[in-house]
Image: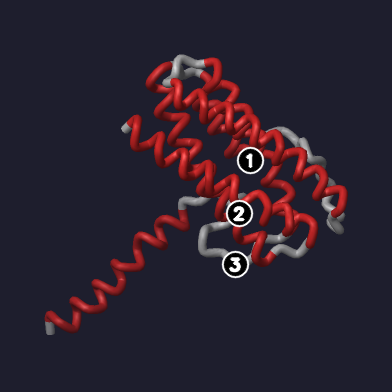
Amino acid sequence: MKTHLTLPMVALLAGAPVAFAQSTAPADIPAVGETKIDTETFTRTVPSANRFEIESSKLAEQKNVAADVKEFAALMVRDHTKAGEDFKAALEQSQTTASVTASGPALLPKDQAMLDQLKGLDGDEFQAKYILLQTEAHKQALALFSTYAQSGEDPALKEFAKKTLPALRTHERHLQDLVAAHS
């Protein structure tokens, strides 16, 4: 009898981390397992996420943090400024009727909340939180961009997503190095 209960329990518990991991994703960011993202979600999320990357990194450049963290922040400002320009160009070529501009509206609530968490911090506290939030933001961005690159509806935006993915993967590797260096 124990064996009959053990196997179903193991199977049930094996799926639990995946279920919990997906349930913690913000509502406006697709879960990693989603296979399709509509254009409206993509065009609403990208400007806010990009702006969070730039604004949080400009904060990092002004704070008392390690040199490698400042270098990463400068890279984020440069790469995400370019991504914003590329997004604007893709929007101009897109077929979307979404009323969105490349600079987008104010930050989405989740991005504003992350930025607000950083504003009052400095030194080691800021550095640890910045690395953590950048890691989370890039994980979400990779899910968003890779999903849209595979199944997006708009050819110009799909191409933008494909072209942006290598930079996002590079950022993720840099973040892994920062985590290892500052943990």
Quarter holding residue 106: top right
Q: Position of residue 43 (x, y in %)?
A: 74, 49
Indicate whether 135 appears above or below 148.
above
Callouts 1 and 2 close, C-beta under 8 Å: yes
Which residue position is annotated with label 2? Answer: 144
Q: Which residue is mark 1?
A: 49
Viewer-proximal residue, 45 or 70? 70
On the picture, is 11 further left or further right than 116? left
User: What element does badge 2 sit on?
Assistant: helix
| Mark 2 vs 3: CB contact within 8 A | no
Q: Which one is nearer the viewer's eye here, 46 or 1?
A: 46
Residue 146 appears at what percent x and percent y? 60, 58
The N terminus, quarter of image: bottom left
Location of mark 3 (residue): 35
- At mark 3, the secondary structure is loop
Residue at 56 percent of width and 64 percent of height: 34
Q: Is residue 59 above or below residue 11?
A: above
Which amino acid type is marked by label 2? Answer: Leu
Return the x and y of residue 140 as percentages of the image width and height: 54, 49
Q: Secondary structure at mark 1?
A: helix
Determine which quarter of the picture holds residue 107: top right
Q: Does 107 sit left or right of 170 as displayed?
A: right
* Gap in angstroms between the C-alphas marked 1 and 2: 10 Å
Which of disc 3 and disc 2 is earlier in sequence? 3
Count the labels in the image. 3
Residue drawn at x 29%, y 74% as measured from the top left: 11
Q: CA distance from mark 2 to mark 3?
A: 10 Å
The amino acid marked with disc number 3 is Thr
Circle 1 packing at 10 Å, graded few (<14), some (14-19), many (20+), is: many
> Residue 77's x, y, as percent?
63, 30
